Image (cartoon, rainbow, N blue to C red):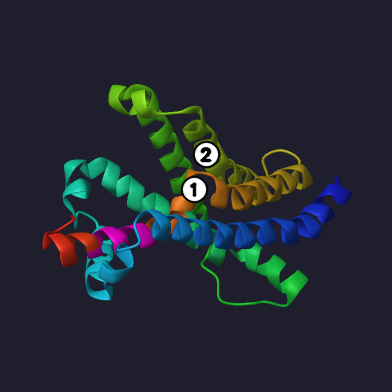
Amino acid sequence: MRELYEFAVGPLAWGAFAVFFLGSIARLVAMYSLAKKKDAPFLSYMSWRYGLRSIGHWLVPFGSLGWKENPALTVVTFIFHICLIVTPIFLLAHVVLLDLYHGIEYPTLPEAVTDVMTMLVVAACIFFAARRFFNRTVRYVTSTQDWIVLAVVFLPFATGLLAYHQVGPPLTMATLHILSAELMLVAIPFTRLSHMIFGLFTRAYMGSEFGGVRHAKDW
């Protein structure tokens, strides 16, 4: 297990980040080429003003009609995304590893805070799973990939929580946590998790079209 752990935090981690960055760049280039081929005029009405206006409204809780329609889902979604992004970046254990292996160090959040944030991500995943299972409309449009993606997001935080609270063999749980986190990283460019990369571009595109062409709001 020690050898697997060292491999996971070393070569495998470099490989996962390489796949993430190169895969993300490749997907962005491919999507740009496809959009240019199928809808070339969109470049003429892409607007910083309308694009940022749209993004701003969608980044504010209840700033759009879609967010207002389901308050509970909106609150959970915002908490989930904030904790999903902030927790791994400012977690003490992660920064310690960065400092140990790469000499990168920066301020972290208190462990009690990141512990709660991790729990919130796990709870949000359970909420999303229950919604997909019990809400008839959502269940109808849910595919196998949706369940897989949800599991891919859930596992790094669940194993990280278990490892932090020393549930199970420490080295095994830490290794599973690292492996599942790397799986998530690799999956981002090639699954529906890619909305983490394309979401702002899509929103800017829609905002530019609605604001600059249709002279209407898209929120």
Question: Which sits in the foreground, 69 or 47?
Answer: 47
> Which mark is drawn over residue 193?
1
Contact between marks 1 and 2 (CB within 8 A): the answer is yes
Main SS class of the magenta portion in the image = helix
- The residue at 39%/56% (across/down) is 199
Residue 112 makes an appearance in the image: no
- Farthest left residue in view: 215
Q: Position of residue 93 (x, y in %)?
A: 65, 62
What SS does tag 2 mark? helix
Residue 107 in the image, given as x and y percentages of width and height: 55, 76
Residue 141 lies in quadrant: top left
Q: Is residue 168 visible?
A: yes
Residues packed near mark 1 inside 10 Å, few (<14), some (14 to 19) or many (20 plus): some
Q: Which residue is mark 2?
A: 149
Residue at figure coordinates x 71%, y 43% from the top left: 176
The amino acid marked with disc number 2 is Val
Confirm whether the magenta stretch covers residue 205: yes
Say the numbered circle drawn on residue 209. none
Instruction: Give the image quarter of residue 90.
Output: bottom right
Disc 1 versus disc 2: distance between alpha carbons? 7 Å
Q: Secondary structure at mark 1?
A: helix
Query: Looking at the picture, how far across and down is residue 42, in whole percent?
Result: 30, 63
